[in-house]
Amino acid sequence: MPDTPLTIEAVSDEALARRIAGGPAGSTDAEESELYRRFAPRVRLYGRRHLRSDAGADDLAQEVLLLTIERLRAGEVQKLEQIGSFILGTSRMMCHSERRVVRRREALAARFIDTSVETAPPSLSALDGRRVAACLRGLAERERLVVLLTYYADRDAPRIAEDLKLSPGAVRVIRHRAIARLRDCVIGGGRT
Amino acid sequence: MTAPGCDRMTLAELTDYAAGELSDTEAAAIEEHLFSCAECAARAAELDALVRAIPPAVRSAQVGGFVTDDVLNRLARDGVHVRTFVLSPGAVVPCAVWEDDEVMVLRLRANFAGASEVTMSQRIAGNEVVRSTGHVAAGSPGEMIYTLSAAWVRQLPVVNVEVLLTAHEEGEERTIGSYTLVHGGALQR
């Protein structure tokens, strides 16, 4: 019985990297877009934590993935089975670099992929603001306040603990519980 | 590499990661895993989307509730139009919001000594329209800060709003503040 070819979404990260590395120029657009779709959210998340900037994180995701594809096509990625580690390493390197390669990014973007491709699942690309607000209102007062102080006022647990006369550990527990409830309310529960 | 059904990352860990409150070593371990596991990366992206939706929701002035000055300061930095009323016990204060106000802030002053929890009740013509229980914060001694949507206040008729603060201490309740907002309707510039 012949093997059914895998759809590109079902191909492993390693196989995807091999196709890009081994394919003739211009023949792996779908694979490059898929690699971007898979990893751009992770680089963006990494960038938000380390750069503390949404715009910086967006830039980082583009730069890292474009550089990764360039390196793949140039045969410069040695361990294709560890493509995730390569992308993380590149993220770390570029995040710590003071010289941001805007012009390089623009030149690479012109040569390779369309980085405007949607990378978030449709259910997450635009959460309903009214629903998020309603779900925030549905939290207990202390839970809501801890969430607002953490993710809106950018206060850390020790500072919140001091303000609310709690221990930092208690703040974290309240935050965990609150985020779980908020997620269940906004997105739907079922997972831990 | 995808690990179907992988549950190595707990929501608690991802929540702390999103809050930027893990040590460098802990964060690096999470990042190593996220870059090798599509399952956990998807869950992290889901949480990230949720966390990023919080600031716009707060700025929309549809959230409300007890807050601290840290939240008000961020609202001010974000350019949100805030109308503030400072109320001492027994105060009768003319109250109105302008058409461009987005958030109404009540700074409720009282003697909170011994109280850890306070319930605020707002009544119009004897009917309770808002009831909320908050914890006394150390950051704003002598007052609790409550926020309401200015849009909600604007739609009220010309009416008195009675505000009552009740402290809870060791199983007992005591009234620590009573205030009257004389709502004069929405104002236009």
Image: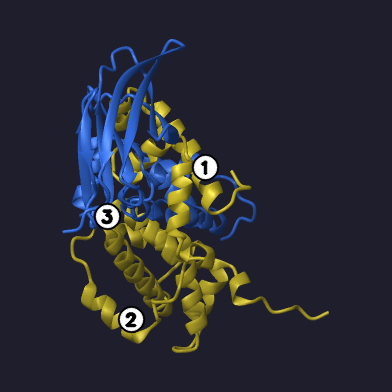
The chain to which mark 2 is attached is A
Q: How crowded is mark 2: few (under 14 residues within 10 Å), some or many (20 or more)?
A: some
For label 2, the SS is helix
Residue under label 3, please give it: A51
Which mark, residue B82?
A: none
Dot 1: element: helix
Q: Is B87 left, or right, of A26 in this rendering?
A: left
User: Badge 2 is on which residue?
Assistant: A109
Q: Which of marks 3 and 2 is nearer the N terminus?
A: 3
The residue depicted at 28 percent of the width and 58 percent of the height is: A95
Question: Is the same chain shared between marks 2 and 1?
Answer: yes
B53 or A21, which is in the foreground?
A: B53
Q: Name the residue under label 1.
A: A180
Q: Please state which amino acid type lies under the numbered disc 2.
A: Ala
Three-letter amino acid code of the residue under disc 1 = Ala
Q: How many callouts does the rendering have?
A: 3
Where disc 3 sits, the SS reads helix
- Residue type pointed to by label 3: Leu
Q: Colour of chain B?
A: blue
Task: Say which quarter of the image contains residue B182.
Answer: top left
Q: Quadrant of the C terminus of chain A?
A: top right
Chain letter of disc 1?
A
Say which of marks 1 and 3 sits in front: 1
- Disc 3 crowd rating (10 Å Cα; few below 14, some 14-19, many 20+) is some
